[in-house]
Image (cartoon, helix red, strand yellow):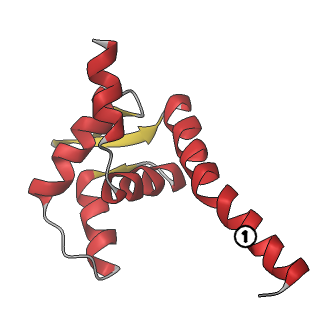
Amino acid sequence: MREFENWRKRFLTRSSLFILWLIHRKPMTGYDIVKVMRNDGIRVSCSFVYPMLTLLTDLGLIEVHEENTGKRKRKVYRITSKGRKYLYSVREKILSPLRKEFLRFLLEGD
């Protein structure tokens, strides 16, 4: 099972990382995520977002809570501590080489 989890983690896309980051900013419903992405000019559908939410939930990076809103129940997604650690580790992997290159540029020039 652990091997399968590692395989799935390697295939997290930029879109799923963006979704994880949105949820990191504040808990959101799937519909809220779709709205934010569309407002940002990203062409996305519910049929894309909800499988990503399922993947992130299965990996333990987010968790879902049901909230009652009148007659309906809404699923609100929140980042877990594991998800926060994963997001920060991805950020460091991306930024660390860029920081070194930028500092080299500042100190040495072209």
Q: Is residue 52 visible?
A: yes
Residue 60 is situated, as x and y percent measured from the top left of the image, at 39, 27
Residue occupying image coordinates x 60% and y 45%: 88
| Residue 94 figure quarter | bottom right
* Crowding at mark 1 (Cα within 10 Å: few <14, some 14-19, many 20+): few
Residue 42 rendering spot, x and y as whole percentages: 26, 76
Circle 1 SS class: helix
Front-most of residues 19 and 31: 19
**Which residue sits at x=36%, y=58%?**
14
Q: Which residue is mark 1?
A: 101
Query: At which x and y percent is residue 69?
Result: 26, 46
| Tally of numbered discs | 1
| Residue drawn at point x = 64 percent, y = 50 percent | 92
Q: Identify the residue at horizontal 15%, vertical 56% (top origin).
A: 48
- Quarter-wise, where is residue 74 in the image? top left
Q: Nearer the viewer, residue 93 or 28?
A: 93
Residue at the far top in the pictured view? 1
Residue at the extreme left: 47
